[in-house]
Image (tube, rainbow, N blue to C red):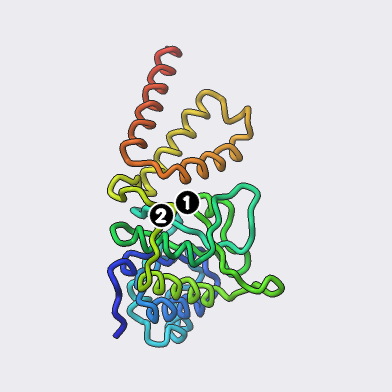
Amino acid sequence: MVTTSRPLSRIRIVLCQTSHPGNIGATARAMKTMGITQLYLVTPKKFPHPEATALASGADDILNGAHVVNTLEEALHGVKLAIGLSARRRELTQPYLDIKKAAQEMIHLAHDAEVACVFGTEMSGLSNQETHLCQLLSFIDANPDYSSLNLAQAVQVVCHELRQASIHPEGASIYTKDLSLLADHDSLMGFLSHLEIVLDKIEFLDKVQGERLMQRLHILFARAQLETDEVNILRGILTQVQKKLAHSSS
């Protein structure tokens, strides 16, 4: 029997729009061998499926307990840190950490909070929209001449690093705040949606390429590690702005 340490039990492996059911099964096997049990599937093409069960090789409990959701936002409900796995640098992007450092950050937070590691599709990886729902991006330091990893292989590498980080913790260097104060993913996304509504109302988005601006703001506020009280203050300011706008237009 695999023993799951407390931090590992709070880690979610999230697969987005997986095409091949075999990769889901192999992911379940990779997770169980490293003591990680929470699997989230965002709109998988085929699941449940006999091929997933076959390649799980006995990790049926992981498959049976998998959470199938419609959006990445649902998969990240309640997490305090989401790290996306990316094979390439992006024009607008969050800070990058190699997988060893990212694993240390995740384990540090997972002592007291839910965290997630997010993987994209087999063919194209994470979309830009999906990466902007993550606070950090990470990469596996593979052979630059042949860096292509199968999805389940990438999950295996990440789960191994997470297990090693749980056994030999080195401490976090980025997420060092009191975790009880840190705003969760839902609070941050709620604030950003509120901010977008207000910026649209004052016609600011139209003047500065709205979609690109919101991408930058997502990155900025994710990097800021806002506390719950700080998010509430910012939303209070936005609400007051909305009241003033409504009053001036009446």
On the image, the x and y values in percent for residue 149 come to 60, 74
Q: Amino acid at mark 2?
A: Leu
* Helix, strand or loop at mark 1: loop
Determine the residue positioned at 35% across, 28% down. 236
Residue with the mark numbered 2: 81
Where is 45 relative to 79, above or below?
below
Could you tell which of marks 1 and 2 lies nearer the N-terminus? 2
Q: Is residue 148 left or right of residue 230?
A: right
Foreground of the two, 220 or 129:
220
What's the distance in space between the residues labelled 1 and 2, CA to CA? 6 Å
In the rendered image, the quadrant that contains the N terminus is: bottom left
Q: Where residue 180 is drawn, which disc sits there?
A: none
> Residue 157: percent from the left, percent from the top?
50, 75
Label 2 secondary element: strand
Q: Quadrant of residue 31?
A: bottom left
Find residue 74 and report its horizontal and vertical position in percent: 39, 55
Q: Are marks 1 and 2 in contact (CB under 8 Å)?
A: yes
Closest to the observer, 155 or 164: 164
Q: Compared with residue 191, is residue 246 higher up or lower down, i.e. above or below?
A: above
Crowding near the residue tagged with mark 1, few <14, some 14–19, many ≥20 C-alpha atoms within 10 Å = many
What kind of residue is marked 1?
Gln
Residue at 42% over, 81% down: 29
> Within 10 Å of the Cα at label 2, are there few (<14), some (14-19), or many (20+) other Cα atoms?
many
| Residue to which mark 1 is pinned | 135
Q: Which image quadrant: the C terminus?
A: top left
Question: What residue sits 44% from the left and 52% below the top?
Answer: 174
Spot occupied by residue 25 in the image (x, y as percentages of width and height) = 45, 79
* Number of marks drawn: 2
Q: Is residue 184 above or below residue 242?
A: below
